[in-house]
């Protein structure tokens, strides 16, 4: 059974930093694609960053150069380091996994709120 638990969200001023964590159980990072998505009120859920099973990363244009996705296989934890935060980064951030353990479908965490004040 796949379980994803996000943490690390909170309230931060513009220009500040936060690091989100996603504790993953039931998946093996070496054969699972992982990612972070976000959803602002009244908007669709959008891709923020992904890391493939092989370790390749990709980012939404809006966060390139500011956010970094990484993983620690020993801890089975996915991270999102967010720097130079902007008010438009305010959203609920979700961890996502897709691989053999999820049956090829996307598994989601419960989300963590990030609020950036101006």
Image: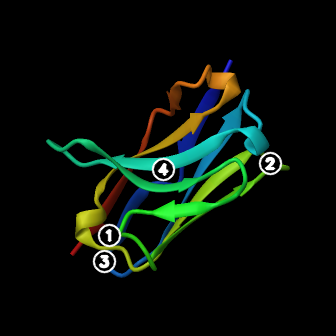
x%, y% of residue 60? 38, 63
Q: Secondary structure at mark 4?
A: strand
Q: Is residue 91 above or below residue 33?
A: below
State how far apart marks 3 and 2 are (Cα): 30 Å
Identify the residue shown where x is 52% and y is 39%: 96
Q: Front-most of 70 and 57?
A: 57
Give the mark, 4 or 2, whose residue is nearer the N terminus.
Answer: 4
Which residue in the structure is indicated by mark 1?
Answer: 62
x%, y% of residue 54? 73, 53
Which residue in the structure is indicated by mark 4?
Answer: 36
Q: Front-most of 1 and 87?
A: 1
The colouring scheme, among rainbow, by chain, secondary structure or one colour, is: rainbow
State how far apart marks 2 and 1 are (Cα): 29 Å
State how far apart marks 1 and 4 are (Cα): 14 Å
Q: Residue furthest right?
A: 74
State how far apart marks 3 and 1 are (Cα): 15 Å
Q: Is residue 108 left or right of residue 97?
A: left
Whether residues under marks 4 and 2 lie with C-beta atoms below 8 angstroms apart, the answer is no
Whether residues under marks 3 and 1 lie with C-beta atoms below 8 angstroms apart, the answer is no
Which residue in the structure is indicated by mark 3?
Answer: 14
Whether residues under marks 1 and 4 lie with C-beta atoms below 8 angstroms apart, the answer is no
Q: Secondary structure at mark 2?
A: loop
Between circles 4 and 2, the one closer to the viewer is 4
State how far apart marks 3 and 4 are (Cα): 20 Å
Identify the residue shown where x is 41% and y is 48%: 37
| Among the 4 quarters of the image, the one containing residue 72 | bottom right
Q: Secondary structure at mark 3?
A: loop
Give the mark, 3 or 2, whose residue is nearer the N terminus.
Answer: 3
Which residue in the structure is indicated by mark 2?
Answer: 75
């Amino acid at each position: 059974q796949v379980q994803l638990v996000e943490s690390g969200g909170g309230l931060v001023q513009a220009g500040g930093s936060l690091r989100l964590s996603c504790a993953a159980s039931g998946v093996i990072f070496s054969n699972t694609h992982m990612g972070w998505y976000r959803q602002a009120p009244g908007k669709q859920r959008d891709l923020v960053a992904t890391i493939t099973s092989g370790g390749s990363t990709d980012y939404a244009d809006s966060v390139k150069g500011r956010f970094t996705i990484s993983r620690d296989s020993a801890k089975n934890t996915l991270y999102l380091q967010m720097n130079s935060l902007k008010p438009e980064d305010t959203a609920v951030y979700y961890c996502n996994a897709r691989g053999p353990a999820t049956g090829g479908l996307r598994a989601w965490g419960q989300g963590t709120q990030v609020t950036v004040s101006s």
